[in-house]
Image (tube, rainbow, N blue to C red):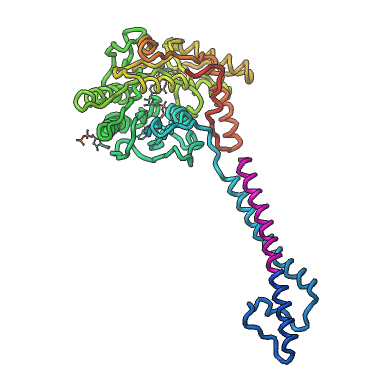
C-alpha cells in the first residue's frame, strides 16, 4: 500500500509540474500573440485589430488592455485554479481507491508448469477455507464452489479479487462444467445438527454431489480427493479405528444420512477409479477444530468454548464418558495436501490420536478459559444422550505416518488456546456489530509446517 500511495503522490507531483509548464507555455504564447498584434497594429495603423494568421486566443482581451504583468497574473491564476481543483478531485479519487483497495495475503510465485488449477468444493466452510489459504499461499489457482449452506463469504473474503482466486456460488448437486487439474471435494455439512437439519439434502449432496464431481474429474482427467469421515466406522467395535475396519453403522438411524452418504461417496470413488481410471484419494477425517468454526456449529468444541466464555452451562449429552480425539485444523490441511500429492489411492485416516472423554474435555476447556480469560462460572449440565452417538473414537494413524509421512504437529492444548482466542474475538465482534475475518497470518503458531 505505501508503495502504491508513494507512486500516486509522485504522479500527482508530476501532474502539478506539467500543469505549471502548460500554464507558462500558455502565457508565453499569449505574450507572443500580444506582441505580434502590437507589431501588426504598428505596421498598419489604419487597420482594425484583425489578424487571421494568429489563433484568436486573446479575443476576450478588452481594448482598454490591462498591463502585461496583470494579464499574466490573471491568466496564470485562472489556469492554476482550474488545475488545482482537478488535482484535488484526482487526489480524492485516489485516496478513495486506496482505502477500498483489497490487500491480499502474500502468495508464492509458481511458474506456469508448476501452478495447478484446483477446485475446492465447500471452500467457504471451516476446513475448506483453511485449505484454500494453504493452496493460495503455495501459489496455485484456486476455484471455490460453495452453496453457503454452512459456509460463509467472510471465511475467504481476504482472497476475493486476487488474480489466482475465483468464487462460484453453486450447489454440487447440480452438474458443473469447468476446467481444473485437481478437486478437493469437501462440500457437505459436517456438524450433526447441520447434517440432520435436512437429511434428504445431505444424502443428495453426498451422493449426487460426489457423482457430479467424479464425472467432472473423469471428463477433465483431474485427480479428486474426497473428504470422508471417521463416521463411516459408525459406533465402532474396533478401537482404535484402522482403515481396514468396515464399520458399524445403523443404516436407518438419524446419523445415517451423513454416515451412509459418505460411505456411498467412497464406494463411488472406487467405482470411478476401477471403471473409468479416475485417480482418487480418500481422507477419513477425524474430529477437527479451530478458528472459523461456525458460532452455531453445534459441535462439541465450539459449544463448550462458547458456553465457558459466556458463563453458560456446559451441555454434556449422555454420561460424558464417550470419547473423541481432536486434531487442529492446520494439521488436517497438511494431511489433505500430502495425501493428494501422494500416490496412495486407498483410504487414509487423518486425525490426532490424543483421546479424551467428553467430560474431561469440558473440564479442560473450562480450565483454559479460567486461566486465560475470566473465572468461568459454567456448570456441567447433563442432557439426554444423542441416538447412535459413537461411544469411542480414536484414529490409528500408522498408515498416514508410513505412506504419506504425516502425523499431527499441533498439541491439542495449543490449538484450543488459539481457538478460544478466536471465539472470544468473535463474541467481541458480535457485541461491536463488526464483521470478522480470521487471516492466514494469524495461524503462525509455534511450530513449523511440514
Ligand atoms: P462446514 O459445514 O464448515 O463446511 C462445509 C461446506 O460445504 C460449507 O461451506 C457449505 O456451505 C458447503 N456445502 C454444503 N453443501 C453443499 C452443496 N450441496 N453444494 C455446495 N456446497 C455445499 O464443515 P467442515 O467441518 O469444514 O467439513 C468439511 C468437510 O470435511 C465435509 O465434507 C465433512 O464431512 C468433512 N469432515 C469434517 C470433519 C470435522 O471435524 N470438521 C470431520 C470429518 C469429516
Ligand atoms: N458432470 C459434471 N461435470 C462434468 C462432467 C460430468 O457435473 O464436467 C456430471 C454429469 O452431469 C453426470 C455426472 O457428472 O451427471 C456423472 O458423469 P459421467 O460422465 O460419469 O456419467 P454420465 O454423464 O454418463 O451419466
Ligand atoms: N457433545 C456434547 N455436548 C455438546 C455437543 C456434543 O456432549 O454440546 C458430545 C456428542 O454427544 C458427542 C461428542 O460430544 O459424543 C462429539 O460431538 P460432535 O457433535 O462434536 O461430533 P461427532 O463426533 O459426534 O460428529
Residue at position x 58%, y 38% in the image: 433
Main SS of the magenta part reads helix
- Between residues 360 and 72, which one lies in front from this camera angle? 72
- Numbered-mark total: 0
Residue 208 visible, this orientation: no
Q: Position of residue 372 (x, y in %)?
A: 62, 18
Nearer to the camera, 244 or 428: 244
Range covered by the magenta-colored residues: 1-26
**Toward the viewer: 379 or 131?**
131
User: Which of the pair 424/23 is nearer the observer?
Assistant: 23
Kindly identify the residue that appears in the image at 32 percent across and 19 percent down.
Answer: 343
Q: Can the viewer see residue 100? A: yes
Quick check: 71 above or below 199? below
> Ligand 2 is found in which quarter of the picture?
top left
Picture coordinates of residue 70 (x, y %)?
79, 72
Task: Identify the residue at horizontal 73%, vertical 86% (top origin).
Answer: 43
> Residue 222, located in which quarter of the rendered image?
top left
Task: Answer whether residue 406 is magenta in the image.
Answer: no
Question: Which residue is at 73% across, 67% downward?
Answer: 76
State the residue lying farthest toward the bottom: 46
Q: Within the magenta stretch, is there residue 21?
A: yes
Amino acid at each position: 500500500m505505501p508503495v502504491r500511495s508513494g507512486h500516486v503522490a509522485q504522479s500527482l507531483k508530476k501532474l502539478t509540474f506539467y500543469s505549471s509548464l502548460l500554464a507558462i507555455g500558455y502565457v508565453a504564447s499569449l505574450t507572443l500573440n500580444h506582441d505580434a498584434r502590437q507589431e501588426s497594429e504598428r505596421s498598419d495603423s489604419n487597420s482594425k485589430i484583425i489578424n487571421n494568421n494568429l489563433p484568436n486566443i486573446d479575443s476576450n482581451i478588452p481594448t482598454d488592455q490591462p498591463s502585461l504583468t496583470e494579464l499574466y497574473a490573471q491568466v496564470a491564476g485562472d489556469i492554476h485554479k482550474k488545475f488545482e481543483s482537478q488535482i484535488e478531485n484526482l487526489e480524492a479519487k485516489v485516496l478513495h481507491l486506496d482505502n477500498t483497495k483489497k490487500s491480499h495475503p502474500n502468495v508464492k510465485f509458481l511458474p506456469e508448469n508448476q501452478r495447478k488449477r484446483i477446485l475446492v468444493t465447500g471452500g467457504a466452510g471451516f476446513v475448506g477455507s483453511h485449505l484454500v489459504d494453504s493452496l493460495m499461499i503455495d501459489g496455485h489457482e484456486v476455484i471455490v464452489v460453495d452453496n453457503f449452506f454452512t459456509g460463509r463469504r467472510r471465511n475467504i473474503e481476504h482472497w476475493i479479487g486476487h488474480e489466482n482466486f475465483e468464487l462460484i456460488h453453486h450447489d454440487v448437486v447440480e452438474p458443473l462444467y469447468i476446467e481444473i487439474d485437481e478437486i478437493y471435494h469437501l462440500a457437505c455439512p459436517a456438524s450433526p445438527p447441520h447434517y440432520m437439519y435436512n437429511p434428504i439434502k445431505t444424502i443428495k449432496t453426498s451422493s449426487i454431489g460426489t457423482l457430479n464431481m467424479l464425472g467432472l474429474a473423469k471428463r477433465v482427467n483431474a485427480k479428486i480427493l474426497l473428504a470422508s469421515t471417521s463416521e463411516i466406522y459408525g459406533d465402532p467395535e474396533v478401537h482404535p479405528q484402522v482403515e481396514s475396519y468396515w464399520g458399524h453403522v445403523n443404516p436407518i438411524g438419524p446419523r445415517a444420512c451423513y454416515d451412509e452418504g459418505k460411505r456411498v461417496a467412497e464406494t463411488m470413488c472406487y467405482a470411478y477409479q476401477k471403471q473409468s481410471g479416475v485417480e482418487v484419494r480418500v481422507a477419513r477425517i477425524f474430529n477437527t477444530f479451530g478458528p472459523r468454526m461456525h458460532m452455531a456449529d453445534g459441535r462439541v468444541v465450539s459449544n463448550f468454548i462458547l458456553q465457558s466464555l459466556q458463563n453458560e452451562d456446559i451441555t454434556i449429552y449422555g454420561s460424558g464418558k464417550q470419547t473423541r480425539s481432536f486434531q487442529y485444523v492446520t494439521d488436517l490441511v497438511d494431511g489433505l495436501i500430502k495425501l493428494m500429492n501422494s500416490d496412495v489411492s486407498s483410504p487414509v485416516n487423518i486425525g490426532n490420536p490424543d483421546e479424551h472423554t467428553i467430560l474431561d474435555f469440558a473440564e479442560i476447556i473450562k480450565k483454559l478459559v479460567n486461566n486465560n480469560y475470566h473465572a468461568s462460572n459454567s456448570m456441567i449440565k447433563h442432557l439426554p444422550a444423542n441416538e447412535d452417538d459413537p461411544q469411542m473414537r480414536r484414529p490409528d494413524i500408522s498408515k498416514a505416518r508410513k505412506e504419506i509421512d504425516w502425523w499431527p504437529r499441533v498439541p491439542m492444548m495449543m490449538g484450543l488456546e488459539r481457538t478460544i482466542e478466536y471465539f472470544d474475538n468473535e463474541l467481541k465482534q458480535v457485541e461491536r456489530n463488526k464483521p470478522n475475518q480470521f487471516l492466514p497470518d494469524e495461524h503462525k503458531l509455534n511450530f513449523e509446517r511440514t
